[in-house]
Amino acid sequence: MGRFHIRLLWRNCPGPLRVAALASSFFAVFLPLVSVLPTSKFNLAGTQLSHDELWATGVALALIASAPLMFFVAAGITLAKTWARPLLVATPWLQYLPFQFAHWFGNGPDPTPSPTAYWFGCSAMSGLTLLYLLFSMRARHYFAHSAQPTVQADAASPRGLT
């Protein structure tokens, strides 16, 4: 897959998906940086943590563990991969898990001071994402485009499909 193909996909990417890909790319880089910069502070559910507290509570590991999820969301959207759709719907729930593990197994602060608000927020985001992916013709076409074979007229492909 060349640069031209990725540019064409990006140009055809619907606006909300493009914003999600850009935000995920940013957080895939930003979250690990917060954990390794010695002057950084992080606010988790109203609890301000210094750099030393990030590592002592296990929240730094949660930040680092969240980065691959954000990377795969961004890559899946950018490359219009069909596996990115369920990942997009599950992201509000999945990005929470490393912080909950830091609370359960480490000494981290509780990431959900209000479980009802958290469940409602994650359900609403997942529901809206699912509705968008199901009913937006541009989003459906964008992801369907990558699932179809492309026709090439070269001798290497016996039926012209790759």
Image: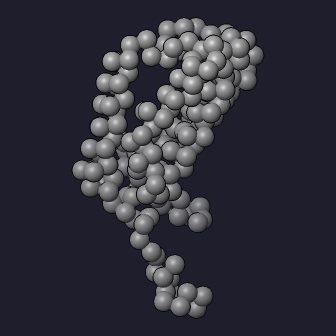
Question: Going 51% across and 14% down the picture, which residue do you hit?
Answer: 110
Question: Going 37% across and 49% down the picture, which residue do you hit?
Answer: 14
Question: Going 75% across and 16% down the picture, which residue do you hit?
Answer: 38
Residue closest to the far front = 105
Q: Would you place residue 144 above or below residue 133 in this image?
A: below
Residue closest to the far left = 135
- Horizontal placement of 121 versus 110: left or right? left
Q: Quadrant of residue 49?
A: top right
- Horizontal placement of 56 versus 109: left or right? right
Q: Would you place residue 38 above or below residue 131 in this image?
A: above
Q: Can the viewer see residue 78? A: no
Q: Quadrant of residue 16?
A: top left
Report x, y in % for residue 160.
Answer: 49, 86
User: Which quarter of the figure is the N terminus placed in?
Assistant: bottom right
Q: Nearer the viewer, residue 142 or 107?
A: 107
Q: How is the image coloured?
A: one colour
Q: Would you place residue 119 above or below residue 2 in this image?
A: above
Question: Going 65% across and 31% down the picture, which residue do you hit?
Answer: 64
